[in-house]
Image (cartoon, grey):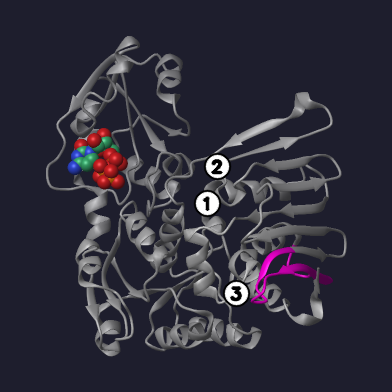
Amino acid sequence: MKKVITYGTYDLFHKGHYNLLRNAKALGDYLIVGVTSSDFDKNRGKLNVRDSLMTRIKHVEETGFADEIIIEEYFGQKIDDIKKYDIDIFTVGSDWKGHFDYLSEYCEVIYLDRTKGISSTDIRNTKSIKLGLWGFSDITTRFIDESKFVSGIDIEYIYSDSSDTLDSSTLAEYDLERKDDIEEFYESVDAVYIVEKPQNQYNAIMQALMHKKHVLVEFPILVTNSQINEIIELAIQNQCIFMEGLKTAYTPAFNKLVTTAKSGIIGNILNVEANFTQILGKQIQNQIQLVNGGSVNALASYSFLAFVKLLGLDYKSIQFFSRMNEEQIDIFTKVLITYENSIGASMVAIDAKSEGELVVAGDKGYIYVPAPWWKTEYFEVRFEDINQNRKYFYKFDGEGLRYEISEFIQAILNQKHSILLTHDEIKAIIKLLNMYTSKNIIKF
Ligand code: CTP
């Protein structure tokens, strides 16, 4: 019996997939189809797969060509599968020509003609979300660059009032058309990405939501507690997705870290230490200008994300110890937060330096994330008995913004708010930022 194996994502199942499976089956007597798991796709940089794994499996099954369906979960699995299932022929479409020649050591490799003029990417792109840019800053260009890695999003328009210094060469470089008329801008887009100073955020967000546009706001959102309640209420009422662009929240490794910590593997969580410190550089200067503040306003959202995710929403007390410069801007702040059964600590600095690591201590072991933890791609679970230690690796590509963009698109398409940073968690982070008032600050 001739056994054939083939692999694919089979997202938004189309004729090309059908033809490929039919031709693969015709190569032998028994066809095994490997369908990629969502984690594996994320890990190999394939973001924005629309259909769930079960749906994709169902579509493959319905063709009737597959005698067996397996799940592809890791790099190198193809060699294991070929040996394990005693495969004679490995096949994929001709778009992969040459790529899998290394498998010829184990079986015959055949590249089948690809069906012309159709792909999952094309289908995703024909139903693209039109994202408009509100405001322009250093982060905007990185956002545009990263959006190219996510299919199903189209950034064409930017709204900017006349006081803005956005020049025509920048517009041309990023292929953007500037709209000066607000109504025209909103008519042209489905969603907006807002980069605004704190004092303008509330109005910008509310206006977008009133126009029934989905909203992604670059961090930190620095509005009052009652304003964020109003914003979220309006978003729900108008059936709009409202998300904060706190990129770490959406990265694969950070999410695994949170679920690993919560799984009980390190026992009860007793202490979280999360530092984010920088010496005044170009990027942080832009951020300070944008937030009109110092270390806490510019950076503490990241530490608060770790507290909220790992220790919960209901803290008992918070205290800030700040070093101010002549302009009364905190260049270094140590934050201490207490909960019923745990505590958190964080150093944030815009002009001082410490190790930017994250340590989650439990009564059975601890999790260690090396600097820069907010761009996590690796963490280690450590125990007293070092033989039990485990290392975990995940993909973190580019600036990491692509995961946030992908999550935003996914939330819009599913009409369901992201579970990676919930509305309650956004509120809790803002509430903690709003605790940075003279009453809670000890200056040194
Ligand atoms: N395939 C094909 N003809 C097409 C599209 C895909 O023969 N027009 C084949 C691929 O070569 C692969 C299998 O179908 O062997 C599964 O491909 P997959 O990557 O899931 O589909 P694509 O449409 O190429 O997806 P994407 O655009 O997301 O890369």
Which sits earlier in the primary sequence, circle 2 or circle 1? 1
Residue pictured at 21% horizontal, 27% vertical:
97
Q: Which residue is mark 1?
A: 251
**In the image, is residue 93 above or below residue 160?**
above
Residue projecting furthest to the left: 116
Residue 194 at what x, y percent from top left? 42, 75
Q: Earlier in the sequence, mark 1 or mark 3?
A: 1
- Residue 72, quarter of the rendered image: top left
Task: Tell me where the magenta segment starts and ends, as one range.
Answer: 312-333
Q: Amino acid at mark 3?
A: Gly
The foreground one among 350 and 401 is 350
Per the model, the C-alpha gap separating discs 1 and 3 is 26 Å
Q: Position of residue 11 (x, y in %)?
A: 33, 48
- Mark 3 lies on residue: 293
Residue 90 falls left or right of residue 382: left
Specify the quarter for ligand 1: top left
Element carrying mark 3: loop
- Mark 2–mark 1 CB contact (< 8 Å): yes
Q: Position of residue 118 (x, y in %)?
A: 17, 48
Residue bearing the label numbered 2: 377
Three-letter code for the amino acid on which mark 1 is drawn: Thr
What's the residue type where badge 2 is placed?
Glu
